[in-house]
Image (cartoon, rainbow, N blue to C red):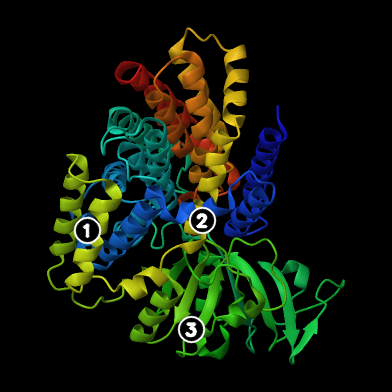
Amino acid sequence: MTFDQAAILILLVGMLAAFAIDRIRMEIVALGGLAIGVFLGLVPAEGAFHGFASPAFLTVVEVLLIAQVLGHSGLLDRLAARIPATGMGETGLVAILCLITAFISVFMNNIGALALMLPVIYSVCRVSGFDQRRMLMPVSFAALLGGLCSIIGTPANLIVSQQLASRTGHGFAFFDFAYVGVPAALAGLAVLVLWTRRVFTPEDRRRVPLPGHSFRRIVTEVLVPKGSELDGAAVDRFPATIHAMHRDGRHILFQRPGTSIAAGDVLLIESDLSKLETWLSERKLVLPHGSPAIGGGLVEAVVMPESTIVGSRVQTLETFFSRGIQIVAVAAQTPRIEGSLADLQLSIGDVLFLKGEEEALREAFDEADMLPLWPRLAKPSVEKPWLPVIAFVAGIALTAFGYASPELAFGLVVLFLAAVGALNLRRALADLDWPILIMLAAMIPLGAAVESTGAAAIMAGNLISILPADNPLLLVGAILALAVAVTPFVNNASTAIVLGPVAIGLADAAGLPPEPFLIAVALGASIDFLTPIGHHNNTVVMGLAGYRFTDFFKAGWPVTLVVFLIALCALWLFWI
């Protein structure tokens, strides 16, 4: 093994470990790795930024821009109103929501499909009274399953298509992934609907007014009013977790033995929403500054992966304060809670409870790239809401029938939408999830270096030495299993970038066509149901529903197993 081969492998392993630990922003890790690759001569200096001109990168940007227009069109609002009226039971609603999400995800990226469906799910659960925990994770998984079925369903599919084009001169057709993706997705959806009911059993069989909220931990500041039965109560007997106590503007060390609560104390507490609502209604506690009760008169909004406030503290959110918006409480995931509500650091999936004027809230959500969940804010009327859909379908037709490449077809759609005034390019480009895009563009040259240095051939040769070269199904199954093993800890685009050249090398070493191996990489990179950190969809719903880390494994292992087996059978039937 040469120096270059060893260096690129060590560099990529280190970067994948950094992605998995998630202590450094992903775009910083990717750009840092690219800089090291250029410094060591692994990536030519003139090719360092070729990733930004990559067809895969351009197509992802275009699809994200189109998804913004579709999301603002309001086409799913009617769906949110009609689904509860069908009178379906919980199983039927979960099945319908999963099918719709999977279908949408065939034609746009996974997080975009989930973002479109989240307000629908909230509306359905509020009206029907069903538990969000039994719907959010299945819908998140359904978005990943739908992405298996087309070339634009997920960045991993675009990446391996570009890798195939670099190797053979032609990429995958628009629906080449559907031969394997459709049966695998249908099997996975069936398991989702049936299995998650067993994993997430309701606290009781009756419908409850605020479904799922009993599982959510709310962080807020409360004031102990005069006459409260909690006045004089010992801190260690307080019926919620106290993170900080302030009395007369001074911080109190409430951990001291014998410390008691006094009227006028301001407490930073963490509690179940249902219990907190009860204490507020009984006047045992009140919210400072005359805020309404949580859950009443407030707007709930979730911090999305592309939100500009990820990593910010509440006290720095001038986007809201400058518009007179008050942050009343946060459903937070961070384990470090101290000081005051203003000191709380926000992360993906956190839910903010906000009080403010509707127009101000709408502007703040647009500026911060947050997704309002409940209540549904009135949207400005959109003229010809079906026009973006027709344009998008035309773009899909152009690439599906081979008249244009994906980046050209969807580029034409973007230009058309901008020309008719449906898309403000300057604003839409600013709203894109640039950390993910920068990570993708920076990783593409490093993935090419895996092949150009010969490291992919070395790894493929090692795999061939331990696997029977005369068994194509076993070889494809091995690369599929490797992708499935890596992706719960690393985003699927990075998994495809790193393993794609290895898959091509393995195909060359076995004297087989690269197509089934690359499809196996793309599918394996998206079979991400075991952890909340492998894909942003899972991270978002973890914060919304208060899932534990282990909940994803409990719900996801049967889906992973079934999708893996069906995908392998479909690969053998259609591609090997």
299 lies above or below 2: below
List the residue tagged with mark 1: 412
Asked whether residue 121 appears in the rendered view, the answer is no
Residues packed near mark 1 inside 10 Å, few (<14), some (14 to 19) or many (20 plus): some
The residues bearing labels 2 and 3 have C-alpha atoms spaced at a distance of 36 Å
Amino acid type shown at disc 1: Leu
Q: Earlier in the sequence, mark 2 or mark 1?
A: 2
The residues bearing labels 1 and 3 have C-alpha atoms spaced at a distance of 36 Å
Q: What secondary structure is found at the residue carrying circle 1?
A: helix
Q: What secondary structure is found at the residue carrying circle 3?
A: helix
Residue drawn where x is 57% and y is 25% of the image: 457
Residue 142 image position (x, y, % from top left): 36, 43
Is residue 510 shown left or right of residue 110? right
Is residue 351 shown left or right of residue 138? right
Is residue 499 shown left or right of residue 89? right
Residue drawn where x is 23% and y is 65% of the image: 415
Q: Nearer the viewer, residue 202 or 455?
A: 455
List the residue tagged with mark 2: 49
Q: Which of marks 2 and 3 is nearer the N terminus?
A: 2
Residue drawn where x is 22% and y is 58% of the image: 412
State yes or no: discs 2 and 3 in contact (Cβ < 8 Å).
Answer: no
